Image (spheres, rainbow, N blue to C red):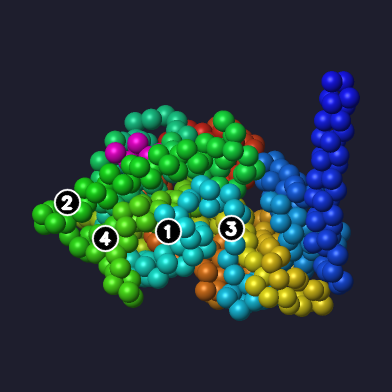
Amino acid sequence: MEHFYITLLLLFVSFVTLSLFVLFYKHRSNYSADNLPPGRPGLPFVGETLEFLSTGWKGHPEKFIFDRMAKYSSQVFKTNILGEPAAVFCGVACNKFLFSNENKLVTAWWPSSVDKIFPSSLQTSSKEESKKMRKLLPQFLKPEALQRYIGIMDAIANEHFASQWENKEQVLVFPLAKRYTFWLACRLFLSIEDPHHVSKFEEPFHLLASGIISLPIDLPRTPFNRAIKASNFIRKELLKVIKQRKVDLSEGKASPTQDILSHMLLTSDENGQFMTEVDIADKILGLLIGGHDTASAACTFIVKYLAELPHIYELVYKEQMEIAKSKSPGESLSWDDVQKMKYSWNVACEVLRLAPPLQGAFREAINDFIFNGFYIPKGWKLYWSANSTHRNPEYFSEPLKFDPTRFEGKGPAPYTFVPFGGGPRMCPGKEYARLEILVFMHNIVKRFKWKKLVADEKIIVDPMPMPAKGLPVLLYPYKS
């Protein structure tokens, strides 16, 4: 019997040793080609993922990029992120190359963990589902369509500030900004107006957003596990909304053109097929994430920078009050009003440069190609970084200085300012985000001045920037 256990132990040790050897060999073989970009792959399987993520957790996601740009190459270096051999592209030439070669040499890529959090009912990948969404969205997110949303956005902003900010000495800005943008998304995409109904989704969406780009460890209480559970909960709730809308449409209680949900239910594809309820729930889930999470980060950092820079606040206040004084009591903002908010938008753009909600994005090489003299193999993952240009003195003088005048006239050079990506995959909700941010700025500055309660509050990037304590501020309301 003793020999039997010794044999089992030896077999187990041999199996583990062989497995580690295969893993190590496979890891090294990914980097065996000639003329790859400089850099290092890190450890087998995990690569440099922990360094990549931890610099964000410490509030300096650009450090991972700039340290390697200085050590290896200012334009492209190799690494291993999320278990994949990868090349990180940095700078204007890289941005132009990637954005211009979409679906030619590169295509969108998400980690397999994203498909676990957003499983498609049609057994297709997140990439394929994203392509379908981009065909659906333009008619709802183009400027002509968005014009009719301004009054609704302003009404929701008024109600939000009246109920959540007014008559309070201090507030936490980040959760309130998320509440504002999420309420807007629910109202404009799903026609959900009841704040209590909206609040039911808030915490699950927070858990979902926190776990999208996290270590894919599906164990209890991990961010990844919580994100999967939150996704399943939200999908079930959305199915209830979809079923009720189908009834309302059949009974004439809902309009076919009132929002994107009605459009999805009533529009067939080129083969005459309609989307299933589960498929619609999947797409609405992605829309709600994209429609509120990035804008809420932008709104939060606008409040942060306006608190730190009173001279900038005064110029924004002057512009917004000129618009406010031109309105009669109870009159909502109009499209023309928003077009007058030029300085405010320059301020918002400078915030997006210094604290981009989207730190970067992944692509996948669909063919072998040569870039800048280096060989990029088919199947490698490519990561472009907003910070590689946003905080680079080569493209923005004194890059850490807050200067909205950078955006006057023609503004930054092409491919240097990329908070919404670029090329065919530029964020389709760019104009929608501009409107909700400007409506937020108008409604907050006409009501308050404010002061930060934590002078040097730490910023965490996970995967979007957020103040570690939620940005508590002391409010100083204007007398009406």
> In terms of sequence position, does the residue under pointer 4 or pointer 2 come before the other?
2
The local secondary structure at tag 2 comes to: helix
The residue singled out by tag 4 in the image is 265
Q: CA distance from mark 3 to mark 4?
A: 27 Å
The residue singled out by tag 2 in the image is 247
Q: Amino acid at mark 1?
A: Leu
Residue 477: x %, y % from top left: 38, 37
- Is 438 located above or below residue 203 in the figure? below
Q: CA distance from mark 2 to mark 3?
A: 36 Å
> In terms of sequence position, does the residue under pointer 1 or pointer 4 come before the other?
1
What residue span does the magenta drawing correspond to?
A: 197-202
Find residue 186 and name its label.
Answer: none
> In terms of sequence position, does the residue under pointer 3 or pointer 4 come before the other?
3
The residue singled out by tag 3 in the image is 110
Mark 2, mark 1: which one is toward the viewer? 1
Residue 134: x %, y % from top left: 43, 68
The residue singled out by tag 1 in the image is 122
Q: Residues within 10 Å of mark 1 (few under 14, many from 20)?
A: few
**Residue 155 lies within the magenta run:** no
Label 3 close to label 1 by CB (< 8 Å)? no
Q: Residues within 10 Å of mark 4 (few under 14, many from 20)?
A: some
Q: Amino acid at mark 4?
A: Leu
Mark 3, mark 1: which one is toward the viewer? 1
Q: Residue at x 47, y 67 (%)?
A: 131
Label 4 close to label 2 by CB (< 8 Å)? no
> In terms of sequence position, does the residue under pointer 2 or pointer 3 come before the other?
3
Q: Amino acid at mark 2?
A: Val
Q: CA distance from mark 4 to mark 2?
A: 11 Å
Q: Residue at x 58, y 66 (%)?
A: 108
- Is 354 located above or below residue 377 in the figure? above
**Residue 198 lies within the magenta run:** yes
